[in-house]
Amino acid sequence: MATQTPIQRQAAAKRAAATRKRNAAKRSATATKASGRRTRGAASGAARNARSNARTTARTAGATTASAAGTAMKAADAAGTRLGAAARNAQRAVLIPVGALAAAGEAVRRAAETYTDPRRRARQFDRFERRGAKALVWGRRSVAHRTR
């Protein structure tokens, strides 16, 4: 697998976190709906049975309402996390060209340093000479090899 940059890792982590939060919100919503159904059933039974059951049912209904609010918050948080992952990808799209420009600038600076200093320039020309001689030898060998 190819190595990831820190921004790619962070975006993947954000996407994974958003998925986990979304799944948790779905589970919570399912539980909240089930609790609501039980509360409605208990409310109709409480109306038949007495006042004390009605108080218990009212408490349960309040808890179900709070649970529903928490579920809505979880869903909103999951959406926000997903947006954060998209923002990381947008940030990466901006940082790549900036990094390329910085690398190009450093290369130009190094070249300028090399060719303005007489000793460095002589050493670089010697390197080019050796490389050129090696390329000619390899070229001759490859031509000789092909003609056989």
Image (spheres, grey):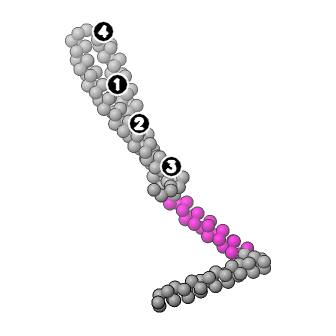
Give the labeled residue for mark 1: 64
Circle 4 Cα neighbour tier, 10 Å, few/some/many (<14 / 14–19 / ≥20): few
Circle 2 Cα neighbour tier, 10 Å, few/some/many (<14 / 14–19 / ≥20): many
Determine which quarter of the picture holds residue 128: bottom right
Identify which amino acid the numbered label 2 is placed on. Lys
Image point 51% across, 89% down: which residue? 144
Image point 64% across, 81% down: which residue? 131
| Mark 3 element type | helix
Q: Which mark is residue 84?
A: none
Q: Are marks 1 and 4 in contact (CB under 8 Å)?
A: no
Identify which amino acid the numbered label 3 is placed on. Gln
| Mark 4 element type | helix
| Mark 1 element type | helix
Q: CA distance from mark 3 to mark 2?
A: 21 Å
Q: Could you say where residue 117 lies in the image, as x and y percent from the top left?
A: 77, 77
Q: CA distance from mark 1 to mark 4?
A: 19 Å
